[in-house]
Image (cartoon, grey):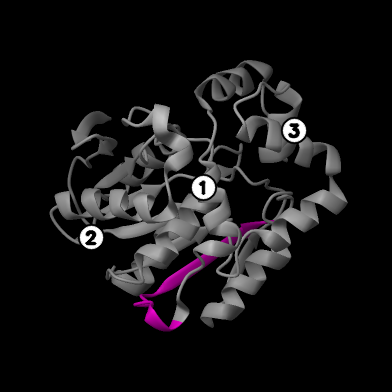
Amino acid sequence: MIARRVGSLEVLSCEPPQRRRAAPLLFVHGAFAGAWVWDEHFLPWFAAQGFSAHALSLRGHGGSDGHGRIDWCSIHDYVEDVAAVAADLDAAPVLIGHSMGGFVVQKYLEHHSAPAAVLMCSVPPQGLVAAQFSLLFEKPGLMIEINRLLGGGNVALGVLREALFAQEVSDDTLARYYRLMQPESQRAIWDMSMFGLPNLPAMRRPPLLVLGAEKDVLIPPFLVQSTARTYGVPDRIFRGLGHGVMLERDWQHVAETIRDWLQEVAG
């Protein structure tokens, strides 16, 4: 893995020993996270499959600048970050977004083209409101703890396990992830709730893969299915996985599905 900068943004890159795919991959992380979530498994694995694989930390996240101003960051700002890194690559990238990152990808496609896009456990185009109500009714205690994390407060490790994982994860691994997590932009949350929803008629729609997780308590399967219906594509729900699909024990099932789909649509 190579850590580099594109302007003020952190970019983690893994290049294959022999590149066999024309389009690079650009991974976009979700809320409270950074490029590190992709470096754990996905970046090296996709590089081994012949892809040029890259992940950015959105402004105010990971190793990028702007932490002190994160509450002022909008989804539009995050789209600009993706556009800046995409323009720095040697070809237009396939975009792969998780959770909030999937929402950012949808907004990116309003004004930019991509050879393909993958939405993983993504905030739906209708926004966060349905997910917020679902969490409030199904797991009100978790909703309270996530709001505490949003405001920069500390939460127990068990909260992270409940929010992200359905499979076994060690306490040491969970503690390491917790140390890497951070507050999220209040403005971005509002944008995803009601003020900055995707303009569907304006979107440049590439081939689209919509993925979800059976045990996801943050973006439940019914919302993933709603996203797929909105875009007129099938959904794929992974049994036994939680919201943090790229960090789950069986992450490779998800990665293989993306690889196989990309081979079908892009060759």
Q: Give the labeled residue for mark 1.
A: 187
Q: Residue at x 63, y 65 (%)?
A: 224
Asked whether disc 1 touches disc 2, contact meaning CB atoms under 8 Å apart, the reply is no
Question: Is residue 214 something one can see in this rendering?
Answer: no
Q: Tag 1 or tag 3, which sits nearer the N-term?
A: 3
Most foreground residue, 64 or 194: 194
The C terminus lies in quadrant: bottom left
Q: Position of residue 58 (x, y in %)?
A: 37, 41
Task: Please tell me whether mark 1 sits on a helix, a strand or a loop.
Answer: helix
Task: Please tell me whether mark 3 sits on a helix, a strand or a loop.
Answer: helix
Q: Tell me how far mark 2 sits from mark 3, CA to CA.
A: 40 Å
Question: Is residue 79 something one can see in this rendering?
Answer: yes
Q: Give the labeled residue for mark 2.
A: 23
Q: Position of residue 252 (x, y in %)?
A: 51, 45
Q: Position of residue 183 (x, y in %)?
A: 54, 31
- Magenta stretch contains residue 4: no
Q: Position of residue 11 (x, y in %)?
A: 27, 37
Asked whether disc 3 touches disc 1, contact meaning CB atoms under 8 Å apart, the reply is no
Magenta segment boundaries in residue numbering: 201-213
Q: Give the labeled residue for mark 3.
A: 145
- Of badges 3 and 1, nearer the viewer stands 1
Kindly identify the amino acid type of the residue bearing the numbered disc 1: Arg
